[in-house]
Image (cartoon, coloured by chain):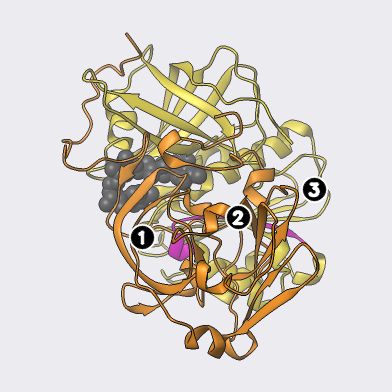
Chain colours: A yellow, B orange
Amino acid sequence: MNSRRLVWRIARLVEIRDETPSARTLVLQIPGWPGHLAGQHVDVRLTAEDGYSTQRSYSIAAPADGERVELTVQRVPDGEVSPYLTEELTVGDEVEIRGPVGGWFVWRPNGTAPVLLVAGGSGIVPLMAMIRARRQAGSRTPFRLIYSLREPGERYYAEELRLPHPGLDVTYLYTRAVPDGWARPAGRLTIADMNTGGWPADFGPECYICGPTGFVETASDILLAMGHDARAIKTERFGPTGG
Amino acid sequence: MGFVSRGFRGRPRDEGVKLPPGQYLVHDFPVLSAGPTPRVPLDRWEFAIDTEDGQTHRWSWQELMALPAETPTVDLHCVTKWSKLGTDWKGVSLDTLFADVESSAEYALVYSYGGYTTNLPVEDLLDGKAWIAYQFDGEELAAAHGGPARLLVPHLYLWKSAKWVQGIRLMNEDWPGFWETAGYHNYGDPWREQRYQGD
Ligand SMILES: Cc1cc2nc3c(=O)[nH]c(=O)nc-3n(C[C@H](O)[C@H](O)[C@H](O)COP(=O)(O)OP(=O)(O)OC[C@H]3O[C@@H](n4cnc5c(N)ncnc54)[C@H](O)[C@@H]3O)c2cc1C
């Protein structure tokens, strides 16, 4: 058990990468950062001049790398925090962060069971940390990623996922608009998608599902119907709607 | 002077609403759980209280429905930062369920269909503070929100209100549950912002 106290630390924004027109990766430098596991998240706290403050959770997008922590934030229209993080915050600015949080939705590079990652929209973020952790560790654990999103322009980490990763298969599912010549018509995740892009239950994969609540419910119900063990299905739910 | 986030103003504040520190108000009902949603058929549903002496008290679904129900209106505070105010529930008070239970145990481990567990002191379950709830907003409780029945202990962070509740084990020793073992606070009082161990 981890009894380390989670203190608020000052993080400085050192780099910004645009992922899509409405999502950006924030690279933060956090003195004293204790390290983290792929899949964990942080709490971000913003404080106004009058002392009002509010907090939100954000998944960490990359494996531990000293004092650097990467988040990818999707701008939610009319949101209180995400527009600030994606539009207002600039390199050199500071935010308060504490973490890492969450010891359940994690993948450790010494894992040997095949892994199925199922992402809905920005739910890709903690799963990308797992993909990057696998590569960083030189792990040969077979990974399959099913990434559902509205349309091709909403892909995060598009360049990086285009590169060949031996042992990682990526399937994109589009729910609203598909690229020209794309065989699968636009539509929500189905059991057929999970059969094609995932693993048979008797391979005993570890399954990680992350995204909006409705997506996570659908994906986990499909895996149960396919005979996957409920204990091998880990879920993280990001928000009420979207994705 | 504490930390200020340059250029952050936040939402207009409704001074009339007091929330626990670090929480924000929502009007929908988000879902938090660590795995798939279990589906429990009512004809096989059962709720149990197991005492420290090995006695078990059991209720079938019909027996639970036959007990006097209450309709509490309570505020919910989730550790993932959202709060939802004035939610309407229907369920059986744990005072009613504990009426014939003989126990002097101080700790409870609540367990659920699907394997979830959470711990809390027995006194936090009694004196009108907790219910086995089976209706939300006048409707049967949806499986995603813990139906057919969940524990409702609104004065603690919502992970203590175990969904898909199956039973309560009474113990002389405190035994950390699922999130409590994963680094979350053992007690979880939102007003003292007890989110994580050490808070
Ligand atoms: C464990 C965890 C990890 C998370 N990781 C990430 C992450 O890596 N990247 C990321 O971008 N977000 C992540 N989130 C979501 C994030 O915490 C915020 O909820 C999100 O940024 C919206 O905050 P906001 O203040 O901008 O909007 P709010 O002011 O809180 O909400 C504004 C409106 O948008 C709705 N809304 C809230 N969240 C969403 C959403 N996700 N999609 C659509 N509508 C929404 C609300 O219901 C409300 O009506 C995570 C959440 C959790 C619990």
Q: Which residues are magenta?
A: A205-215
Question: Which mark is drawn over residue A141?
Answer: 3
Question: What separation in Å lies between label 3 and label 2 (alpha carbons)?
Answer: 45 Å
Question: What separation in Å lies between label 3 and label 1 (alpha carbons)?
Answer: 37 Å
Question: Which is closer to the viewer, label 2 or label 1?
Answer: 2
Side (left or right) of B199 relative to B104: left
**From the image, which quarter does the C terminus of chain B lie in?**
top right
Side (left or right) of B29 relative to A69: left
Q: Position of residue B75 (x, y in %)?
A: 34, 54
Which amino acid lies under the numbered mark 2 shown in the image of this protein?
A: Val
Under circle 2, the secondary element is: helix
Judge whether A170 appears above or below A11 on screen: below
Chain letter for mark 1: B
Which residue is tagged 2? B122
Contact between marks 2 and 1 (CB within 8 A): the answer is no
Which amino acid lies under the numbered mark 1 shown in the image of this protein?
A: Phe
Residue at 28% from the left image edge and 35% from the top image edge: A83
